[in-house]
Image (cartoon, grey):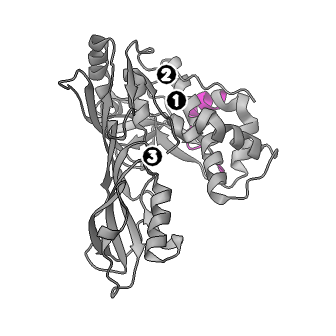
Amino acid sequence: MDLPTQYHYLNTKPMSQAVIRQLPEDFQVVEIPSFVAEGEGEHEFLLIRKTGENTDWVAKLLAKFCQIPIKDVGYAGKKDRHAITQQWFSVRLPLTRKINWALFGGDSIEVLESVRHQRKLRLGALLGNRFTIRLRNLTHESEFLERLESIKTGVPNYFGEQRFGREGGNLIKGLAMINGEFKERQRHKKGLYISAVRSWLFNHIASERIEQGLWDKIMPGDIMMLHGSRSHFLAETVDDALIARLQTFDVHLSGPLWGRGTSLVADQAAAWENSIVNPWTSITERLEHLGLQQERRALRLVPEGLRATKESDGQWLLSFSLPAGSFATSVLRELCETSQIEAEEK
């Protein structure tokens, strides 16, 4: 099945080009937790800085080092491999057991802090991430700086290329799987493939909304999402107060994460959304039968604390924070066309 994956830019395709991830330190991520560990309990929380290692691999190393089942290791989110990242892990350990964490890791993994907590660290238990990205060999600097100002009001909240796998492999396998062309027995991989299909549909709808001039226009029946929250409400009427809330980033328009049940949108918004997904009913119907529930995701992504600094060697250092579940590549996409030495899935 040939799916449209050339998503529209908000402000046309940028002329600027840059190289990213030439070295691990060119892409740095610091996790922003959603709570503070209490200081006591059977789970030990570890703040770990890792270089060139993926999250699942570190979790497996922790389980082996502590001699515990992998199910007793937790983390809030997966981080890029080709980067220097700082994130929390949890390990379930008896209160009487003391471990010298200086012995864990090596050159690429370092435990920065440890503290006890009552409960395991669960996936999604984070507010977001802070990014520091070095742009090498940046071209068209004036255009880049203009775009930097323009995207402070938001970019499309596209799922990044990492979600779809190398050369779109996760999406290809996901389509084949829901069409019954092959079975995936590993639960983790099955989830990745289904998520890729669901994410493609969201990206496609977001792209069409931009193309049709509806990126910042509220339609009656739209689902509005509160900024920084998964809470949402139905826009039964569109008045000046609601438009002002959209313009001041208090609320955002949303797109569907497809699943079972009646679509949450209504009226004009429902008619428009149905017109976009109608050509893809073979996909939406199969997603509904997988047991996933209808959810919503904000269409707009607002990078906080966005700034770019030119370094002494002529390279640029870009920094910003994003909420959990969003992609730094979606911000970069609107700023410059990037190339990299290695491209790996998160």
What is the three-letter code of the residue carrying label 3? Arg
The quadrant where residue 75 appears? bottom left
Q: Nearer the viewer, residue 85 or 313?
A: 313
What is the three-letter code of the residue carrying label 1? Ala
Residues in magenta, as a range: 259-275
- Magenta stretch containing residue 335, yes or no? no
View extreme (right): residue: 181
Q: Are marks 3 and 2 in contact (CB under 8 Å)?
A: no
Q: Are marks 1 and 2 in contact (CB under 8 Å)?
A: yes
View extreme (bottom): residue: 96
Q: CA distance from mark 3 to mark 1?
A: 28 Å
Q: Nearer the viewer, residue 133 or 136?
A: 136
10 Å crowding of disc 1: few (<14), some (14-19), many (20+)? many
The residue identified by callout 2 is 210
Answer yes or no: is residue 238 visible.
no
- Residue 201 image position (x, y, % from top left): 61, 35
Which of the two marks, 3 or 1, is nearer to us in this view? Answer: 3
In-image side of 305 versus 82 (left or right):
left
Q: Give the quadrant of the N terminus.
A: top right
Name the element at disc 2: helix
The residue identified by callout 1 is 206
Q: Residue at x 49, y 71 (%)?
A: 64
Q: Are marks 3 and 1 in contact (CB under 8 Å)?
A: no
Mark 3 or 1 closer to N-term?
3
Q: CA distance from mark 1 to mark 2?
A: 7 Å
- Residue 192 image position (x, y, % from top left): 61, 49
- Residue 280 image position (x, y, % from top left): 71, 32
> Disc number at residue 81?
3
Which of the two marks, 3 or 2, is nearer to us in this view? Answer: 3
